[in-house]
C-alpha cells in the first residue's frame, strides 16, 4: 500500500440517518468558516491549497467578503438548500475541506438524499499510517461535531475571527477539544 501527499484521510460524521436542521447547518458552517484557516495549520501544506480539498471560506461566493458579510449572507438563507448552495456553489462538487454534499435534499416537500447516509465529510487531513495522528484527528473532528451547537455564540465567533491564526487555534482547542 502506498500513501503520498496526494492522498487524503476523510472522516464521515453524522447524526445517525438525520440531516442537519437549517439552524444546525447555519451554526456548523459559521463555526467552521471562522476556524478553517486555523485548522489548516494542523495539516500538511499539500492539503491547504489542493483541488481535492478546496476552501469553503475562499469559494467564489465568500472570497471577497468579510466574515460579518458572510454571516449576513448565510442569515439571508431561509432554507437548508440556500445555506448549502453558499457553501458549495458548484453543484455536486464534493472536493471541499468540508464536504456537505451528503446533506443536499431536493424536491418540494419530498426529501431525497443522493447518498445512503447524510454525513458531513472532513477531507482536510493527509493520509497517514500513524495511528496516533489518525486518532488525534478523529477525536478532534468528533469533539468539534458533538459540541459546535452547544457552544455556538456568533458574537464570540466574530471576535475570534479577528484574532491571529495562533490565537484562533488556541480558542479552537479550548472550546472544542478540551
Image: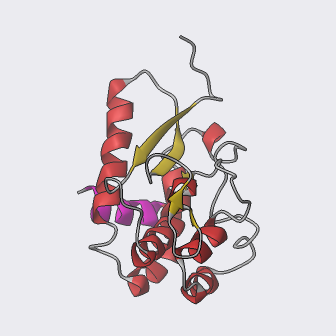
Q: Which residue is drawn at 62% across and 41% down?
A: 47
Where is residue 146? Give x, y as percent. 28, 60
Q: Is residue 47 above or below residue 88?
A: above
Q: With 142 as the anchor, is 121 left or right in this view?
A: right
Colour convention: secondary structure
Quarter of the image with the C terminus in it: bottom left
Vertical order, 3 against 23 (above or below): above
> Which residue appears farthest toward the top when viewing the image?
1
- In the orientation shown, which residue stands out farthest toward the left? 178
Foreground: 123 or 15?
15
161 or 128: which is nearer to us? Answer: 128
The number of callouts visible is 0
Can residue 173 be found in the magenta stretch? yes
Q: Where is residue 173 in the image (x, y as percent from the top left)?
A: 33, 58
Residue 49, how many percent across, how many down?
Answer: 69, 47
What residue is at 62 percent from the left and 80 percent from the top? 70
At horizontal 70% and vertical 79% (from top left) the residue drawn is: 65
Segment colored magenta: 166-177
Q: Quadrant of residue 87?
A: bottom right
Residue at image point 63% right, 84% down: 73
Q: Position of residue 111 (x, y in %)?
A: 50, 66
Is the magenta region chiefly helix, strand or loop? helix
161 is within the stretch colored magenta: no
Query: Seen in the image, is 86 located left or right of residue 3?
Result: right
Depicted 71 relative to depicted 134: above or below = below
Amino acid at each position: 500500500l502506498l500513501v503520498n501527499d496526494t492522498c487524503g484521510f476523510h472522516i464521515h460524521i453524522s447524526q445517525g440517518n438525520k440531516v442537519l436542521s437549517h439552524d444546525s447547518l447555519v451554526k456548523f458552517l459559521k463555526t467552521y468558516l471562522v476556524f478553517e484557516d486555523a485548522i489548516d495549520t494542523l495539516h500538511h501544506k499539500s492539503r491547504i491549497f489542493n483541488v481535492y480539498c478546496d476552501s469553503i471560506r475562499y469559494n467564489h461566493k465568500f472570497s471577497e467578503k468579510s466574515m460579518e458579510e458572510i454571516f449576513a449572507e448565510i442569515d439571508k438563507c431561509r432554507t437548508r438548500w440556500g445555506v448549502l448552495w453558499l457553501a458549495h456553489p458548484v453543484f455536486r462538487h464534493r472536493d471541499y475541506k468540508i464536504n456537505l454534499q451528503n446533506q443536499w435534499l431536493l424536491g418540494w416537500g419530498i426529501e431525497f438524499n443522493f447518498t445512503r447516509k447524510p454525513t458531513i465529510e472532513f477531507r482536510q487531513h493527509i493520509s497517514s499510517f500513524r495511528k496516533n495522528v489518525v486518532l488525534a484527528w478523529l477525536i478532534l473532528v468528533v469533539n468539534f461535531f458533538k459540541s459546535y451547537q452547544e457552544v455556538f455564540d456568533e458574537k464570540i465567533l466574530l471576535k475570534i475571527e479577528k484574532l491571529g491564526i495562533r490565537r484562533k487555534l488556541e480558542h479552537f482547542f479550548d472550546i472544542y477539544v478540551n
